[in-house]
Image (cartoon, rainbow, N blue to C red):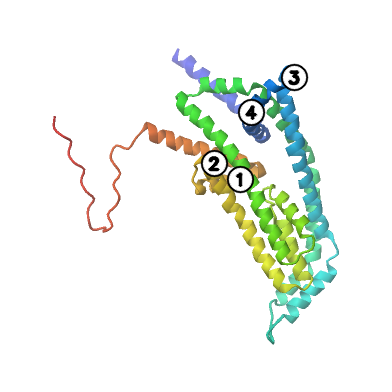
Amino acid sequence: MERDRWLSVVLRTALLVLFFWMVRTLLVPIALGGLFALLLSPLAEKARPRLGRAEKFTPLLFTFGTIVLVVIPFVFITIEVVQSISEFLARDWTSTITRLQSFLTNGIDIRGRNIHIGGPQLTAAIQNVGQRAATIAAAAVGGMAAAVPAFILSLFLFGVSLYYFLKDGGRLVRWLFRLSPFPQNQTRELFASVRETVNGAILGILATALVQGSLSLVALYVFGVPNAFLLGVLAALLSFIPLVGTTPVTVGSTIYLFATGHVGSGVGMAISAVLIGLSDNVVRPWVQSSSTKMHPLVALLGIFGGLELFGPVGVFLGPVIAAMAVWTVDTYAKLHPPRREAVAPPSDPNVPPPKSAPPASS
């Protein structure tokens, strides 16, 4: 009897491991569809009564709306960014390189003093920048073309999973509640934590776009970059793309200012580019922690760890995993309270800590 039980456990575990190993490369778009369904499910439930006879089409309408309003614009923005960067790198940089070489050779005249910036090694490195830029542009376009089939498959899986999570999400939640090894109150806390984390991730992305777009617009106006308003709007849109952000706009503007001889404005724009890029590491974790009561450091680690492990979608998945880890620690602390009262360490290391009072005799 015991042997049959262990054999059943081993076979079930092996089948589950085999299944997840088989679909391991497809889990990210499915998980992303589940997170979007978790975010949209309250709106879908409110919309059902208003659709009347078309109530059963609510999941399909929300799936179609998400793809049209979120996914397709994101795809077009990404394609436009890649094409703009490729065209920017593949353009004729002969005159710009000549100006940079002259700038590095002659130096800067400040109050009658000539200050040299570059040396022979830096000048030689800049001579090959055109070839390197063309190589980078060709590699970017080639990589994008190679990733098209995988992206189409991921988009299809995202749409299908979003539809079924919206359609059968209630039954899935009830099924998970029945299978959960934790008490119902802890399971509810876990689901609430995941929902708050997804909402915080969305708010963090929107807040980052607003802050970085505004800062970029101000910097572009102050330092005299042409078409500052359009570039500022583009920077706000680019901030939605993880690992890219406002870099194409701010760095490209810096190069333009240096190439046109506006050295002071170029230095100011370079400093602004660094500050704008760093603002993402402050705004996003702060909004995430404010929405989920998660420590900003944990939120920051979740975002960067998710980006490292899952790529761009790690902006959503990383904080969710971090929230589940925090939930694990919190529930353990509630189930296993400390056996003794915590005492603050004395300011003087030579003073021993106070002894606890003996138990009262009955």
Marks 1/4: CA–CA distance: 20 Å
If the image is split into quadrants, where does the C terminus sit?
Answer: top left
* Marks 1 & 2, CB-CB < 8 Å contact: yes
Residue in the image at 46% along x and 26% along y:
185
Marks 1/3: CA–CA distance: 34 Å
At label 3, the amino acid type is: Ala
Mark 2 or mark 3: name the one nearer the start of the chain.
3
The kind of secondary structure element at disc 2 is helix
Residue 204, numbered label? 1
Residue in the image at 70% along x and 55% along y:
246
Task: Give how far across and how far down residue 27 sits, in percent.
Answer: 65, 33
Mark 1 or mark 4: name the one nearer the start of the chain.
4
Mark 2 or mark 4: name the one nearer the start of the chain.
4
At label 4, the amino acid type is: Ser
| Crowd band around label 3 with a 10 angstrom C-alpha radius: few (<14), some (14–19), many (20+) | few
Residue at the disc numbered 2: 291
The kind of secondary structure element at disc 4 is helix
